[in-house]
Amino acid sequence: MSAIRALPWQQAAWSQLTRARTQSQLSHAWLVSGTHGVGKRAVVAALVASLLCEHTQADGSACGDCKSCKMLLAGGHPDAHLLCLDGHLGLAANASLQREDGITHWQPDKASKRREISIDGVRSLIEGLGLASHRQGNKVAVIAPAEDLSRASADALLKTIEEPTANTFVVLIADQALSLSATLRSRCQQLRLGLPPPDAALDWLQTELPAQDRRSLQAALDLARGAPLTALAQLQDSATPPAIAWRAALDAIASGRGDPMKLAAEIDDDTAIAFLHCCQGWLADRLRAQLGTTAALNGTRVAELNRELHDAHRRLDSNTRAQLVMEAMLIGWVRLLASQAAPSPQSPPMQSRAR
């Protein structure tokens, strides 16, 4: 069995983590953030595996062969915890960080509408971390996505993060770190993962999908705005979301020419999450395009737009109809962008300015 490693483009981040560990300076609480699809869970899985491994490799990676590694791969390691909307579960070293047949410490009632990570789940996690290690080693908990923590849940976590029991590590994963409270962020060591270089992302996609021609891989990567795991998911899904058309529609709405209700009607339950990720990428590109101009969105408005996006995610989690969620979000965006002056027609395009 091979070692459990971070993705190829994450070597700088991995070196930062292993250097801190070697120097006994590894924080007991980490906040790992970055664009959706950049591979945050992969580097976190590698970190968890390394912290639990009984025979780490020279580069700090887990061996993949010891009893702890095998238990982790099976989702059955008693010192590896995952807290998510589905409850307090055993953590596994795979893409989703969980296995259906893994350890279950606590789960919400199946009839409940799970919009947030409940305080009951946090209490179960805190209780588990308070126990002695079953393997006489480290105890590790991952919270993902951390944006789903309720206010009460986040507050309940603070004491555990500030005063952890011995050999305890807590890792929060978030697409949008700013969605978390400033208090919670300040208690964590932050690791921000950027997009990989295009060639590195393309080479990795080619390794994952050797039968695909490079031109198709490049098109998928462009559609995913450079996020390799998003591109991989789209290539593996025959129904690739029409992100290009969505972005054109968002441009029209932002300029006052588009119809938000018409766009919302095109989104269904199967494409809703992909559409929200498209909106996130569109907003980031709009900010980059407006840097240095008088039309730049101010911080307050950006925060409000992000809140609309996050609220849409939560409403989808509560099984609200996708079209209703999108209508509410897009109407909110129209309201927030209405007072935003459009860039001057005389302004040079982004490509011309970025020389």
Image (cartoon, helix red, strand yellow):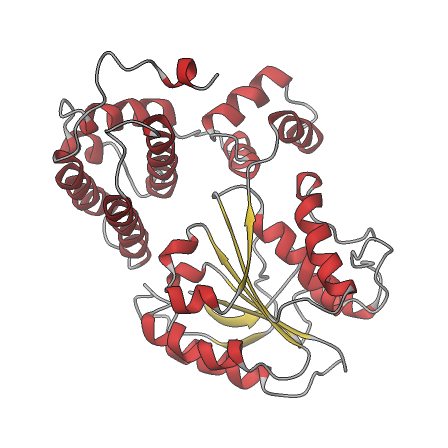
Q: Residue 330 versus residue 238: which sits nearer the camera?
A: 330
Relative image position of residue 14 (x, y in whole percent): 70, 51
Residue found at x 23% / y 22%: 343
Left or right, 144 with reference to 203: left
Q: Residue, x 21% and y 44% (percent of image)?
A: 329
Which residue appears at 85% of the width and 57% of the height?
Answer: 57
Whether residue 84 is visible to the viewer of this picture, yes or no, is: no
Decide which of 80, 173 is in the foreground and name it: 173
Determine the image quadrant of residue 134: bottom right
| Residue 284 shown left or right of residue 132 in the figure | left
Location of residue 344 by image quarter: top left
Q: Residue 232 placed where, x, y %?
A: 56, 34
**How many circles with numbers are drawn on the protein?**
0
> What residue do we see at 63% from left, 26% from top?
202
Residue 14 visible from this viewpoint: yes
Q: Is residue 248 left or right of residue 8?
A: left
Q: Is residue 287 left or right of residue 219?
A: left
Q: Nearer the viewer, residue 63 or 110?
A: 63
User: Residue 286 in the image: x percent, y percent?
Assistant: 33, 30
Q: Nearer the viewer, residue 2 or 145?
A: 145
Residue 68, percent across and down? Answer: 77, 69
- Residue 229 higher or lower than 313, as above or below: above
Indicate whether 68 appears above or below 332: below
Is the residue 169 above or below the residue 14 in the image? below
